[in-house]
Structures are given as C-alpha cells and as structure tokens.
Amino acid sequence: MEQVVQNGPKLPKSDIGYLTSNEDRKNEYYATESHIYKQGPLSGVNAGLHKLSNDIFTYFPKGFQGSKNSDFYEYLSLGMVPYIIGSALLIALYSAANKHYNLADKASSAKVAKTMGAGVVLYGLGKWLFKKITHSAIKGSTGIDLDMRYINKVNELPEHGHQKGLVREQYPGVYDSATFFRSDLLAADGEINHGNVYHWDDKITQKAGFETKLYAPNQIANEKTRKVLARIKALENVGKYIFAATGVALGSQEAFENVGKVFTKYAKKYVTKRVTFFDPDNLEKMKTLDVRVPKFKKLSKLSLKTLTSPFEALGKAFVQLWKGDKKNLITKYYGKALILSCAISAFLTWLIPTIGFKRNPNTIKTKIDENKKYEVC
C-alpha cells in the first residue's frame, strides 16, 4: 500500500509493495526528484560557482549550437557571461597598449585600468550586499528565506550521439516566481526532513502573529508570501543598482588604490595549473586547460599591518566618498547622496514588503477559528 500525503513528495515503494525505511526514501527522493538544496553558509557560493561554470562550458555552447534542450533557466543564467566578457574588455582597453606608451602615460593608463577593475568588482559586490542585507531582514521579519535554492533535475532529450537523454542539475531559487513559487518542494522537504508537511508554512504563520499552529497554515502562508514577493521584486530592481553605483563610486576614490596592495605582497609569483573539466559536446570525455594562477606566500610571513591595511584603506575611501570635493555642488554632495540612498533603499525594501504582514486580531480573529478544522473541496 502506498501512503498518500497531501502536498507531499512521491514516496517510493520497495519491490515487495511496502514502504521502505525513511533513510532509503530520503536517498531515493534526493537521487531522482527535484528537492530543496541543503542550506548552509556556503550554499549560495556553491550554487553560484556551479552556475558560472555551466554558463561557460555548457549553457553557452548549447545555446550557440541550437540545442533543443536549452531552456529558459539557462537563457537567464547566461546574463553573467556578457558581464564578465564586457568587464574584461573594458579593463583591457586601458592596459593592452601600455607597452606603446611613455612612462607618464603608462602610469596614467594603469591607474585607470585598476579603477575600472575595482569598479567591476564593486559593482557586483554592491548588488550582492543589497540582497544580503534586505533578504536577511525579510527572513527575520517574515520567515521567508528568499535565498533558498533547490536542485532541479532536468531530464534532457537525447542528442549529440547519446542513446538516452542526460539528467542535468540546476540551482534556481525557491521564490524566483512571485506567483508560482515552489511551495510543493517546501511541503516535500517538510515531510521528508521534519515530519510535517507544513513545517515551512508554520514558520511563516508564527512570524505573522499566529501563536498556535493552524490546521491548514499553507492557505495563509501562501497568500502572505505572494504579497511579500511581489513587492520586494519591484523594489530590488531599484535598490540593487543604487548599491552597485555606490560601489563603483567607492572604487574610484584615491584611497581605494591601497586596498589591492596586500594582494601584490601576498602573491609571490605566478605558476601554471592544469584545469580539467567535462567536454560540453561529449560529457563522457574530459578536456584540459592550462591556467596561470598566483602562488601565495604563507599568511604567517605577512605582518598584521599588511593584513589590516585593506580595511583601513576601505574606511578612508568611504570617508573620501562622503566628503566629496569642492569642485562643484555635484562632486561635493554626490557621495552623501549615494550613501544615504543606499540606507533608504535598503530600509524601504524591508519595510514595504512587510507592511500588513502581521495579523490584525480585530479583523482576522472574527473570520478564522484557529481551533476548528476546515475541509476544502
């Protein structure tokens, strides 16, 4: 007999017709079904590196070959590739012709190239920092983890001489869609790992002010989640670029030049390393690529002053950005405007989505009896 659980995962059966052990069910479920990715301090980094490597070695070649297995996730993911290529070209424009310049022009060109490089890095870090701050605030207020990802099992059609289609893994966000977020995977994870199909819904309703557990918390949790997602996605499109612009402005400050000096002292010399990866045209074969990487000194050989100098330089760059200069009104106040805009945008991105999230006992208490079961037909 197969157990049926509302909104739960498909529970595997053994060959003799009885349910297998919970551990076997877990292993089979994780091996064959899309599921919530185990969250940890480095889960976002691991997913990002997986996406970046697949962008370059898998999704990009598939798209140009006109693969019938290229999907919308891969299309959106490829936005990272032109950003990297364009950034590299932007920096190279100011450094590639350095050998043809005189000493004064070389120094000026190298300075601009470093500023461009810092701007590229800080542009991305600014967007990341904005999401980190606002998502943490939203999670603390509502229980909705906007950074939660899941492993999506994609069964591809046969191509490139394969007898059967490949099974690829993707790392989308559980809440990527405001209307159709993956509530089914949240229910499956709650049943598999917590013994409660409403585990994640309970967290949201508790944050919303329901002191006792509801019999069908998903009805309230889903409605509140959709409202939060719809509001924050609109605000994010503005706020993340304010943080990015502030990062670029920070990288252009004179004091910021000292941030990278610790790297030049830490990097002793460059060595060639051989990198091995799957051939995107034939995943049964491997390819190799020689890459020059810096060989680093031991941290124990670096002084404490050298290690803390980047943070000191970063603090001075913030002060310079805040003070501006007295050339005109724009250069005098643009730094203050950017920094204050960052604070305001982050605050509003938390405040507006959470307005009305908490229950109002005077209006909801009369409509919902928390101690009564309801059946929805």
Image (cartoon, helix red, strand yellow):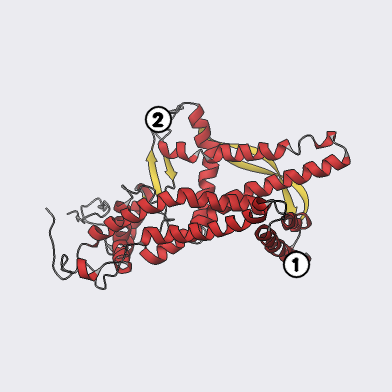
Estimate the x, y position of residue 227 in percent, counting from the top left: 32, 54
Under circle 1, the secondary element is: helix
Q: Residue at x 51, y 47 (%)?
A: 50
Q: Residues within 10 Å of mark 1 (few under 14, many from 20)?
A: few
From this view, report whether residue 339 is shown above or below residue 278. below
Estimate the x, y position of residue 58 in percent, counting from the top left: 51, 36
> Which label belongs to residue 300?
1
Report the front residue among 245 and 280.
245
Report the front residue among 140 and 237.
237
Can residue 278 be seen here?
A: no
Name the quadrant containing residue 99: top right
How many numbered marks does the figure carry? 2
Mark 2 is on which residue type?
A: Pro
Estimate the x, y position of residue 185 in percent, counting from the top left: 32, 53
Residue reaching furthest to the front: 329
Q: Residue at x 31, y 66 (%)?
A: 358
Per the image, the residue denoted by label 2 is: 158
User: Which corner quadrant holds the N terminus?
Assistant: bottom left
What's the distance in space between the residues labelled 2 and 1, CA to CA? 53 Å
Residue 129 falls left or right of residue 349: right
Name the quadrant containing residue 201: bottom left
Q: Residues within 10 Å of mark 2 (few under 14, many from 20)?
A: few
Estimate the x, y position of residue 97 in percent, counting from the top left: 79, 34
Residue 57 falls left or right of residue 153: right
Mark 1 is on which residue type?
A: Ser
Looking at marks 2 and 1 on the same chain, the residue that comes earlier in the sequence is marked by 2
Name the quadrant containing residue 191: bottom left
